Image (cartoon, rainbow, N blue to C red):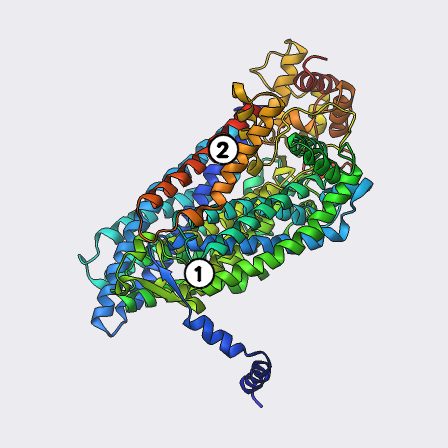
Amino acid sequence: MNYPFWEIPILGSGWVIGIIAIFHVMISQFAVGGGLYLPMAERKALAMKDPEMRAAWLKQIAKHSKFFLLLTGVFGTVSGVGIWFAIGLTHPEATSTLIHNFVFGWAMEWVFFLVELATVAVYYYTWDRIDEKLHLTVGWVYAGASAATLIIINGILAFMLTPGDTWISVAGTGQEASKFWNAFFNPTYWPSLLLRTCVCLSLAAVWALITSSQIDGDKEPALKTSLVQWSVKWLVPSFVAMPFLMIWYYFMVPASQQALLTLGIDTVNAGTFSTVTRMALVIIITSATIIGVAYFLAYRSPRDFNLSHALAVLLLALMATGAGEYSREMLRKPYVIGRWMYSNGVRVPYVSRINQQGYLKDSLWVYNNTSSYSRGEAIFRGECGSCHTMDGYRPIRQLLSGRDSENIRSFIVMLHDYKPDMPYRKFMPPMVGTTQDVSDLAGYLNDQVNPHK
Amino acid sequence: MSMKSVTGSVYEWVDERLGISELAAFARHKQVPVHSQSFWYYWGGISLFLFLVQCFTGVLLLVYYRPGAEAYESVRQITFTMHFGWLIRSAHSWSANLMMFSILVHMFSVFFMRAYRQPREFGWLSGMALLGLAAVFGFSGYLLPMDELSYFATKVGLEIPTAIPWIGPLVANMLRGGPEVSEFTVQRFFALHVVVLPALFIPLLGFHLWLVQRHGNALPPSVEALPAEQRKSIPFFPNFLRKDLAMWIVALNILALLASVFPWSLGKAYDPLAPAPMGIHPEWYFMSPFEMLKLLGMIPWLQGEAGEIAGILLFTLGIVLWLLIPFYDTRKASGQKARAAHYFGLIAIFALLSTTIIGYLAIR
């Protein structure tokens, strides 16, 4: 509406955010968990009585911190900035709403982020150069700053799923920022924060296993055994708490969103939005496997634990994290901001106005007096393009194949009428616009699906 | 009485009757070689695991599948209306494909390690028979949903044996239950898939595993040439078994991921009167033989009916040569014959891959 649409063929614009965001989350959550792992490991090493073991641990932690600095400082920061670029281009309306509400939150986050970047560099470059206690303190400052970034961003992410009644009551009045804290500490804030904390601790363990797997078990058996076993213990909080936290999270999500999780139990039929269920299954099986593999291969036989085992655990962890983030994004459907903005950027209270004035009224870059086909194309991009492509991801041409022009039209009318019992209402926004808009869109889609008829 | 002493006495009671401790002692003493190519040892175990998945999911599908005229409808219900029916069906189909893949990897690793040599000839032959049966499992299972693609692919597949004089049409008609693929064919393929093939496969698998136990893991020639003190090994129990189980878990995860992200869908119901849809092709593991026969038929002096027979004979000769490798590559040291066998293996891989690729390109 207010912004031109950024069209990405085949992949779809949603996946541009998805790929960057999933990549970022895998690293940034490691930055938080690993940020705590480093000073905890250093503290443990400093307290060791055996000087040889103490030195060996410290040497290994220093090595791990180099890997940590490179991974989080380079890939984490670059992908974080990438998210801003991507969401600004693909979802300008939602990004604008978030900035207007959470500019103060993001300002806080960036302060902590700067502290993070500075301290992690100081931490790595001052090994053996400053007093041990001071070095450890730098590690604690890093851990605190990185935890703070999670505490803040979690509020914004959870808000998008469950903005809460208080914020919704002022939404659209210009007073939204006055309810900042209500929006921030929204219904899914705490379960989400604790869930993410567990994921952070797990990722700390998984990445630590990567570096400790490379210690030669025959040459340094005691070091490898103690480090691998200690790292595996970081998985315990997740193992114990995750199932309960997931149940808690599930009950804090609105019933309409809960229902999305069950859509894929019965069917895999195209257009039934069954992926969330399937992704949830992937999370469960990969998480359970990580625990099994970590216990039997790492904890029980740490000396034989090699890089390929560690990479297998990492791969499983990345699959679980990726599937988790994907499911969380999908759970928001049909909204991008719960109850306030549909996933195609249309604000919920604006629907009736757009239905009277027409969808392209505010789209100043589209010639309103252009052909029906062009208007249909512009409406398709704006209203459908956030989730669908023509031939790639959720392909319209395939989803509508077999329908004739009348059938396509009645399908669009059904989406426009948006009756309470319409099955697509569970995960699709309404088609908004005038009767002319409906005809333009239906005509355009028919030309794509049945080009020779 | 403490919990420990209760489990101890239960164990003693069972052990006295079944001799578990002897088995455990045997497993502990059994050694598995460790060397740079040990990775290939896991593929037999992975194939076995995937077969177990096949059995488990197959039994669950059996609860709802109805062969004959209702075949398509029952698979439609399993895929689109029953709780997690799609998951069971997808896991069954994906594990079938993954099993074929892992059996092929297992076969080639055995071939290149020359693990078929004396005294393991029966291991090689039984393994090849298991591969053959697995392929028939695949062919018979592919038809069972009775959708458009499976119907026409089976129709084309069953036309191949008709080229063999006298017995060819007879065998094809017997499998089809008539001159055309129909609901009688599904009934027959179903009986083959769930009764005949398991009855052959399971005892043969037992024999194959018994041979593996009896002769142990074969060493590749390069490791065999090393003096005994330089060869490393680990106990089968628990060390190797633990790694083997870890590989099973990895396989399970890959299977779960494929079944969840790419669930097996179902095409339109078959219509014998409709023209064959575009892109009819055999499953990937049949693509190479299918394409080879097609390419042989394009050789000028192999055209016509006589050519078809010559093609099939040539193809059969290749398989027989492959099967009989333990009997003509017999030398222990890697000499001239071993090198010839090595090249034979490389040519086989090249032929399989290239004809498969050509086959898929031809569809496009």
Question: Which residue lies under the disc numbered 1?
Answer: B243
Q: Tell me: residue B51, above or below residue B239.
A: above
Q: In this view, does A166 lie to the left or right of A307?
A: right
Quarter the C terminus of chain B occupies = top right
Q: Nearer the viewer, residue B314 or A259?
A: B314
Residue B76 location (% of width, % of height): 75, 41
Label placed on residue B346: none
Q: In this view, does B348 lie to the left or right of B269?
A: left
Q: Nearer the viewer, residue B285 or A410?
A: B285
Q: Which of marks 2 and 1 is in front?
A: 1
Residue A401 location (% of width, % of height): 70, 25
Q: Tell me: residue B159, above or below residue B115.
A: above
Total number of numbered labels? 2
Q: What residue type is labelled 2?
A: Val
Label placed on residue A16: 2
> Helix, strand or loop at disc 1?
helix
Residue A25 in sight? yes
Q: Residue furthest right?
A: B69
Q: Nearer the viewer, residue B264 or B65?
A: B65
Q: Which chain carries label 2?
A: A
Badge 2 crowding class, 10 Å Cα cut-off, few under 14, some 14 to 19, many 20 or more, is some
Quarter the N terminus of chain B occupies = bottom right
Q: Distance between the residues labelled 2 and 1?
A: 38 Å
* Quadrant hosting residue A1: top right
> Helix, strand or loop at disc 2?
helix
Q: Which amino acid does label 1 sit on?
A: Lys
Residue B63 location (% of width, % of height): 75, 53
Q: Nearer the viewer, residue A447 or B214?
A: B214
Q: Which residue appears at 72% of the width and 31% of the height?
A: B148
Residue A271 location (% of width, % of height): 68, 35
Are dots 2 and 1 in contact, CB under 8 Å?
no
